[in-house]
Image (tube, rainbow, N blue to C red):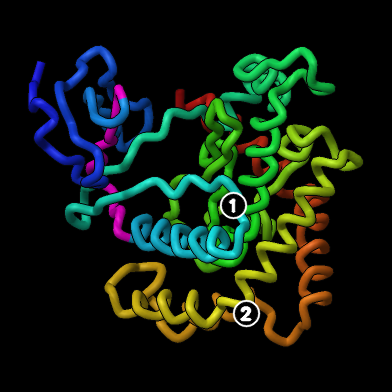
Amino acid sequence: PIFFEYRVSSPVNPKIKLGSCVPEQCYIFNSVMMPFKFAFSAHPMPLYSLIYKCGDDLRQDQVILTMINIMNKILINDNIDLKLTPYTVLAVSPNHGLIEYIPSTSVAEVLSSYGTIQNYFRTVAPVCSSPSGIDPLVLENYVKSCAGYSVITYLLGIGDRHLDNLLLTNQGKLFHIDFSYILGRDPKPYPTPIRLNREMVEGMRGLSSKEFEYFLSLCCISYIHLRRQANTIINVFSLFVHSDLGEISAEPDKAVSKLVEKFRFDLNDHEAESHLKSLIYYSLNATFATVVETIHKFAQKIRR
């Protein structure tokens, strides 16, 4: 094995020191770009993994994850911790880069293997005394992270949100990956404004549950707090419009205006909450999005 004696810092997170390479934990992902996962013994954690991806421009992912991290810090500073997972990406060149690996399972795989998100949680975090049979902390993490990413991906106009791009950790934290389409662009027709479907809501015990009510309240609270810091978010984002990144720099003026539109400055806080709730229910009831997701699942099966 390759041995560094914990003297080499992770290129994406200098706080983590890398040791020996762990060959049995290294493998190639079954996807078009065939990214390679490297695993190392590390300090302060026992195992740390990186994904090397070649043939893909990760600079836009790095920018979007920077924006997600900024919004997360704004919310945490206001005592709103939505259990987000802003993993780190380092674009080494326009054609390759490194991605921090977070142990997780795609929502598509969860539904395929366990039937429902609730069944998955009952398997990885069972608590018999809980009404749902799930560790309450895990369920809370799921609701919070769903709310956080629902609002942030709406603001940034993140597209191509099929269930393979949504991942779940064993701690219940949901997070998004792959930010190739932003600012309202999407390879699929008629995308919903917020990436939320019935299966994800069933993971919260359904539309009539107190968990879903909590989800709605968290969405509204986080949206209002981010609106209050909108100038900071817009100013930081505007720094990237001349960065020669396809989606952002293609139309610099429109890029910033699209972000501004999502904050709905023409509405007061109460009207903004009602607007956001209407988008959530519209997204949940969008029939065409369900059809598109079914077609995507079928295409993935054929590809595999």
Q: Position of residue 153 (x, y in %)?
A: 57, 58
Q: Is residue 53 magenta?
A: yes
Residue on which the image places disc 2: 261
Residue range highlighted in magenta: 46-59
Residue on which the image places disc 1: 81
- For residue 130, which quarter of the picture? top right
Q: Residues within 10 Å of mark 2 (few under 14, many from 20)?
A: few
Q: CA distance from mark 2 to mark 1?
A: 25 Å
Looking at the rendered structure, the secondary structure element under dot 2 is: helix
Q: What amino acid is at disc 2?
A: Glu
Q: Residues within 10 Å of mark 1 (few under 14, many from 20)?
A: some
Quadrant the N terminus occupies: top left
- For residue 121, which quarter of the picture? top right
Residue occupying the point 15% across, 26% down: 19
Residue occupying the point 71% across, 38% down: 200
Q: What amino acid is at disc 1?
A: Asp
